[in-house]
Image (cartoon, coloured by chain):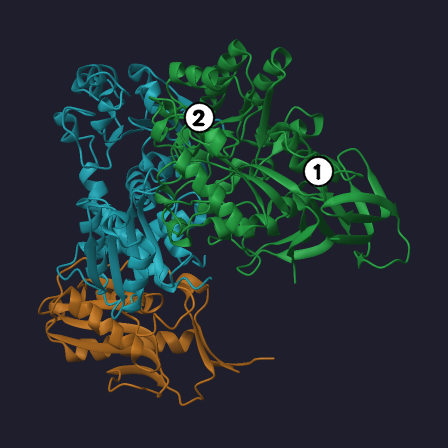
Amino acid sequence: MKWTKKHLLSIEELTREEIDFIIDNAFSFKDILLRPIKKVPALRGKTVVNLFFEPSTRTLISFSLAEKHLSADSVNVSTKTSSVMKGESLLDTAKNIESMKTDMVVIRHSSPGAAKFLSERINSNVVNAGDGTHEHPTQALLDFMTIKEIYKDLKNLKVLILGDILHSRVARSLIWGFLKYDTKVTLCAPPTLMPLYLNDFDVKIEYDIDKAIQDKDVVYILRMQLERQEKGLFPSLREYVKEFSMTYERYLRIKDKSIIMHPGPINRGVELDGNVADSEKSVILDQVTNGVAVRMAILYLLNGGKNE
Amino acid sequence: MNSLILKNCNIVNFDKIEKNKTVIIKNGVITSIENSSKDKGIDLKGKYLLPSFVDLHSHLREPGEEFKEDLFTGCEAALSGGYTSIVIMPNTKPPIDNPQSVTYLKKRELEFGRIEIFPLGALTKNMESVEITEMYDMLKAGAKGFSDDGIGTKNSRVFLNALRYISRFDSFISVHCEDRNLSEGGQINESDVSIKTGLSGIPFIEEDITVYRNLRIATYLKTALHIAHISTKDTLSLIKDFKKKNQKITCEVTPHHLIFDESVHFNYDTNLKVKPPLKSKRDVDSLVKGINDGSIDAIATDHAPHQIYEKEVEFIYAPFGIIGFETSFPSLYTNLVLKNKTDIKTLVKLLSYNPAKILNIDERYIKTGNLANLVVVDLEKEVNVDRKFIKSKSINTPFFNKKLFGSIDMTILKGRIVFRRD
Amino acid sequence: MKKRSLILNEKDISKIIDSMVSSIVEDEKELKNLAFIGIIKRGDIIAKRVAERIFKLKNIEIPIGKIDINLYRDDLSLIDYQPLVRSTEVLFDINDKVVYLFDDVFFTGRTIRSALVEILDIGRPKMIKLFVLVDRKSRELPIRPDFSGIELEIPKRDNINVFLKEIDGKDVVEKEEN
């Protein structure tokens, strides 16, 4: 197939063929990571700006390494506060940066639509590294790659996504992608962290975790933000762990061939038991490795995207 | 003697259209309406003559935020949209919550000199929902009525007291109905659209919950109450029920709530970020039905200017609100009348006749003896909503750079041409 | 209509493979220190054929790898769509080995330049030699093959098409005039 997209903004806008194509490329890039010299000159002379308006360690390092492996020159702009609070708007920041003749911008931002906003206003290729509670496409792509490494095909796999679905951009990207692959998706969360409107999505909702974990090929656990308790969305950590956490006792009851996934960073003892994270079914660290490969594939492909 | 003759026009009133008439105006009053002849006068060449529009809801940002709009630019914008009479909301910075501020606005109205302004005062001091304002003095200074618009009066006891206190006078009380506990942090209506866009949702029931409390208090006190910018089917049916018990209840809807549904948010256009949030197609359909069956009394713009640099930001940082004076009639005509969802007489009823009645001002009906508050419209002419077309300081409208039918060619206040499109 | 003419048939190709084999066996006393790398998509097939014949002759198995040079192209920013990156597979140590690099057609030398850079990223061979089926004699860089089956001087606009049984079902080299 021919890759024509200039930006990576969401999983929703990708076709299944496009997702497969990215992952096929990513597997080749993964080989490069195993070489003594982990560098290819594909993006030599290209400049990439990593514009991170939200704190992030893993995603920023992952993108930075991907850029370096592809021989791109990259700079990181990280700010904990919003651009508006600093007095300069996102648009001004981006236009200024672009005036320094950059080729690509990787953006992480707390506002849904921020990556799209930018892509409509600057000439650089834009990669969405997470926009508020909207999407986190590269995370989902690395997850699909990790699942394909084990199961080859995603069709008819039984997947459970467990945790704060309502506020999770990862969950949204995963659901869009899984549905394109005809994967059987079950969601499990306390009702206050489950979207009220899911009619447009062919997913199963199961509030009882012990039922939800049965027969699943993949158990995907989301990070639990502790500030949700302050907002009155769940009463206590104790009850959350009891009712919705992947405890070791529950781990022993999942299918033998099942895998445990998590987008990181993990809260040991909150959404999953520390021993589950380190267990043999856990592929959490494979996800991290694949993240670099997927991001290399994305940057490589977007560099050739020519559509307006 | 001051006179004006308009010939070859089609007169539209809320109940009928009369073709090919000549309207003769002397000293600001319509003195006769005749069949067109070859007499002197301004030849309108078959354009439509409507009673000028009355806006029950607008924000002119003065005092305090003159960088968004000031009273003069706001008034020019209103005239260019066919409005000769506008209610302006008190949520300026600081709010209009004292007689001196009302006096200041009335003085500015005189300085401008070509429009009727009806300022509302705040119901509570600093709109904090704690103490009621000096409403009697504000009425004497020229306030038309009262509102805690933009916030709403949170405290039920204070709201009841305010309504009771002012009940000995006829005044226009407009309420903004929002449950802040439910809406806080929300960006758009909670639905599959909010889930897919990731924009946090506001449950639509926050509106009718608050409308119910307000209608209940007004009905309990047997006072008049006007519900501002309604947006849901459920609110409308609640209002219909209460109207049976209390005939002094009225309500309004904005043009954008009649035209757009929430699905537009997939583009993250901040010029469609409004309060109350845009709702489902089902709600939009029921509001359109409401303007046709008479259950909605008025269409009001909720003209809310914000500078482009405030709106050209990430969705969650953009302020709520869009401008509406200039595009009100053309957008309604293009999106409703031309699509056979309503007719022009109904627009006249909700833009002119009814709101004038609600404010208890001169009758907006083109007939002998009435004030010549008129607007000339060219229904065939397309306007391009560009920077030149927009008279406001701000261009925050979803219609920017779009074309609309129904050009306001001339606006007439008491027989005087106060706006004319080049 | 494009005019096509036969350059090499199955027999010719087989002969060239044979002479590649004898050239290697003659040059290298220590066949154990050799490694073959073919450039995807047809160089790796030629490498495999040569290695198989050496195995029959000397019973020595030479390791074969393949590389995809797309990430090393110097025209990545000029082409319209990014090609799919295929896996480079060099699953053995090339340090201090004598590496024979195989490709089907030697044209400008740019592909070979890319391949050389990639090989040097993988390790540090003692020596690299270049074996090709066809040399078009229109190099743009100071790089030339150590062995070529046939030399052709044809206009740049014309194509040389190589077909090999393993992926194309036939062994043919043809010229296509544009």
| Residue drawn at the location 20% of the way across and 27% of the way down | A226
Mark 2 surroundings within 10 Å by alpha-carbon count, few (fewer than 14), some (14 through 19), many (20 or more): many
Identity of the amino acid at label 1?
A: Val
Q: Quadrant of residue B99?
A: top left
Q: Colour of chain B?
A: green
Identity of the amino acid at label 2?
A: Met
Q: Which residue is mark 2?
A: B135
- Residue B34 picture location, percent across and down: 88, 46
B177 relative to C83 in the view: left or right: right
User: In the picture, which quadrant includes the C terminus of chain B?
Assistant: bottom right
| Residue drawn at the location 49% of the way across and 42% of the way down | B106
Q: Give the number of marks.
A: 2
Near-viewer residue (B222 or A11): B222
The chain letter of the cyan chain reads A
Report helix, strand or loop for mark 1.
Answer: helix
Near-viewer residue (A110 or B170): B170
The chain letter of the orange chain reads C
Q: Which residue is mark 1?
A: B348
- Residue C69 picture location, percent across and down: 29, 67
Residue C49 visible, this orientation? no
Q: Is residue B279 above or below residue A17?
A: above
Report helix, strand or loop for mark 2.
Answer: helix
